Image (spheres, rainbow, N blue to C red):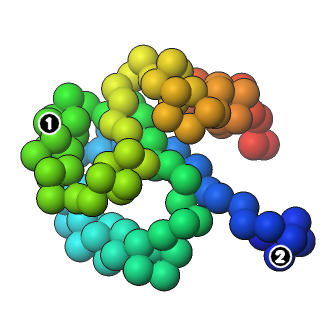
Amino acid sequence: MSIRAGRLIRARFVIDVKDCGLGSVRYLPSLREATRIGQLYFPDVTASVTVVRAPPVVGFVYSLVKAFMPIDMQMKISILGDDFEEGLKAQSGLDMSHLPVYIGGKLDLT
């Protein structure tokens, strides 16, 4: 998209973690590696990362981990629960019309 537009198009990630249980922990090394590569090679491409429908424990764990992150990275990340519409808009500028129906949005992907 950046090449076609002739300018840098920044990504806004919305990650739905509803129903992710403890079994999902096995994927953390992969997520950590993907995050490392993204920050190393594409730090300016990611405008925001918003985790939605997160159980309270995710927010708690993030509050412990974020102290070890650079401030600019902390500012890009937001962890939100089930009632995320307002926080999503504040963090990323996206509203529910930009999200698929399966997470409460209005975008029909079928």
Question: Could you say which quadrant of the image residue 95 lies in?
Answer: top right
Q: Is residue 102 above or below residue 15?
A: above
Left or right of residue 19: residue 103: right
Residue 37 drawn at (x, y percent): 41, 80
Q: Residues within 10 Å of mark 2 (few under 14, many from 20)?
A: few
Q: Is residue 79 above or below residue 11?
A: above
Closest to the camera, between mark 1 and mark 2, is: 2
Q: Residue furthest left?
A: 64
Left or right of residue 51: residue 33: left
Identified by mark 2, the residue type is: Ile
Q: Residue at x 37, y 54 (%)?
A: 72
Residue 81 drawn at (x, y percent): 34, 26
Q: Residue at x 76, y 35 (%)?
A: 108
Q: Which mark identifies residue 60?
A: 1
Residue 33 drawn at (x, y percent): 32, 77
> Where is mark 2, residue-wise?
3
Q: Quadrant of the C terminus?
A: top right
Q: Quadrant of the N terminus?
A: bottom right
Identified by mark 1, the residue type is: Phe
Say which element carries label 2: helix
Q: Is residue 98 visible?
A: yes
Residue 109 drawn at (x, y percent): 75, 43
Question: Could you say which quadrant of the image residue 5 lies in?
Answer: bottom right
57 or 12: nearer the viewer: 12
Q: Residue at x 41, y 72 (%)?
A: 39
Left or right of residue 89: residue 78: left
Left or right of residue 80: residue 68: left
Q: Residue at x 55, y 53 (%)?
A: 47
Q: Which mark identifies residue 4?
A: none
